[in-house]
Image: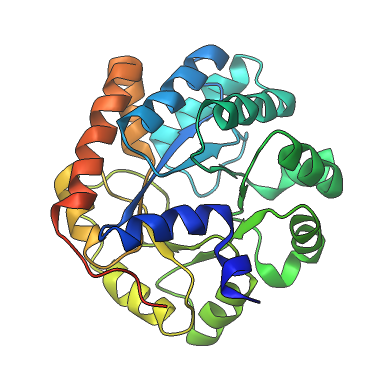
Amino acid sequence: MSELVALGKAGAAIRTANDAGRAALVGYLPAGFPSYDGGVDAIKAMVDGGCDVLEIGFPYSDPVMDGVTIQRAAEAALAGGLRTRDVLSTVEKLAAYSDVPVLVMTYWNPIERYGVDRFAADFAGVGGAGLITPDLIPDEGAEWLAAADKNDLDKVFLVSPSSTDERIRMTTEACRGFVYATAVMGVTGARATPSDLAAPLVKRTKAVTGIPVGVGLGVSNGDQAAGVAAFADAVIVGSAFVKALADGGPAGVRALAEDLAEGVRREPRAPAGR
């Protein structure tokens, strides 16, 4: 796979930030929370606050990886009647709002139920950049890999501290966009301090791939973002944005994004190597 193809849309945005001497900021919010329109406005606020890549959650009734904060937001979105078409419509509105790449993080069952080829085509058609698939591993994802390649979509898979070196190599070879390094074992959620397992995992992952490595799970403020930005290509923030939205609406989301964006710019770093 050529480097340009491996970078994909999200990876190119991350590398642009890296070449400017900083880590990229990836912001997550679920579609449909606190309402359809409210969710769109909140995600736009992440863009306005400085996010380089958007990660839109596809609310699901059995989110095995998500912590309580995201679970409750997903439950509220589903209770409000959110459907697949609403997720696609959200992506379309955000793609029209800015050139910030829009990824969807989704469990695999909703995509399989919709139809993998159909979803890939419809998602690409509304301007989506790619999927993050936390419960799909590359060796069980042939149908998605083919559909993503056909529609020029990013394929973001996860590695964790428990991944073997061989598993990390195999996973990164299947990725396009970036590699999602889950910095802690267990479910998502903001933490008082990021995991000390993050830096070693990034080092192991970078040893086998040249595409960007993003770190998620735990970052909740600019100081923590600055710490992770020292070794990761991208800092991924989710639960803290959901809490900011619940507590302060879109204005709270923008304020947090601005704090995090300042954090990833705080410590200059050398441009990413090729």
Image quadrant for the C terminus? bottom left
Q: Residue at x 24, y 47 (%)?
A: 191
Is residue 197 in view from this perspective?
no
Circle count: 0
> Picture coordinates of residue 85 (x, y %)?
74, 25
Classify residue 125 by image quadrant. top right
Q: Residue at x 53, y 43 (%)?
A: 101
Classify residue 113 by image quadrant. top right
Answer with left or right where residue 232 lies relative to residue 145: left
Classify residue 167 by image quadrant. bottom right
Q: Residue at x 40, y 72 (%)?
A: 161
> Picture coordinates of residue 137 (x, y %)?
65, 66
Image quadrant for the N terminus? bottom right
Q: Residue at x 40, y 78 (%)?
A: 206
> Picture coordinates of residue 65 (x, y %)?
50, 49
Answer with left or right where residue 220 lies relative to residue 109: left
Answer with left or right where residue 187 lies relative to residue 243: right
Q: Nearer the viewer, residue 242 or 89?
A: 89
Answer with left or right where residue 83 lies relative to residue 190: right
> Picture coordinates of residue 111 (x, y %)?
75, 44
